[in-house]
Image: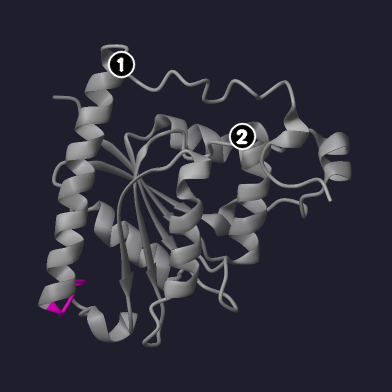
Amino acid sequence: METLKVLAIGTSSNRNSINLQLATYAARLIEGASVDVLSAADYEMPLYSDAREAELGSPEPAQRFMQKIAEADAIVISFAEYNGSYTASFKNLFDWASRIDTRVFQRKPTVFLSTSPGGGGAQSVLAQAEQSAKYYGADLVATLSVPKFREQFEPNSGLMRQTALRDELNLAMASLRDAALLHRGQSQHGLGQTDGAGSGRQEGRSKQGVSLC
């Protein structure tokens, strides 16, 4: 059987972020998977506006980001929370990517995670992401917030200390694996989504993605 390709995404502008660590740890729970790690910090672009889009077209980092998603069988993304919402770096990347295709996640089986140093576990941004997932082409399999990251993880072994959270994360990854295998089988037999995903890339762009305001 061909190896599953899992894309682990951290949304912080910090390349050593705890959310990138969590996404990577979670993705590697899928035994035998090939894990590609992506940090939003590596996809910096000018702040999106319709004027910049008219000037620049689709920047190479946005195209590269969409290609990474296209090549993946499954996605694990962990959201950092800044002031109760998305990080500026990820929001800008997402805005640019949504101009290529509104369904940024491209119908890929996806798990949304979040974590923070404190007890909140970045639940506010996770709730926002979950609420909008269906509008951006995510086949959302599971979500999980992990509070007090540094207390939850053993720094030497890299393992989660709390049994209940560890079990939830293991279950989420098992479900993601199953969904990815099913999705790949359907795609190979031509049974994937046929509702025009990506069909609006050239026409009606002002009706897609970010608002032109």
Q: In percent of the image, x 68 and y 36: which residue is there? A: 208
Q: Secondary structure at mark 2?
A: helix
Q: In percent of the image, x 77 and y 52: which residue is there? A: 46
How far across and how far down the image is residue 66, in percent? 54, 36
Rendered image: mark on residue 63: 2
Q: Amino acid at mark 1?
A: Leu
How far across and how far down the image is residue 200, in percent? 65, 24
Say which of 3 and 134 sits in front: 134
Please tell me whether residue 159 belongs to the stretch shown in magenta: yes
Q: Which residues are magenta?
A: 157-162
Q: Does residue 179 appear to the left or right of 14 in the view shown?
A: left
How far across and how far down the image is residue 71, in percent? 41, 30
Say which of 45 and 112 sits in front: 112
Q: Amino acid at mark 2?
A: Gln
Q: Secondary structure at mark 1?
A: loop
Query: Does residue 2 lie above or below 129 as drawn?
Result: above
How far across and how far down the image is residue 99, in percent? 68, 37
Q: Which quarter of the figure has residue 61?
A: top right
Q: Which is nearer the N-term, disc 2 or disc 1? A: 2
Q: CA distance from mark 2 to mark 1?
A: 26 Å
* Residue that badge 1 annotates: 191
Quarter the N terminus occupies: top left
Rendered image: mark on residue 87: none
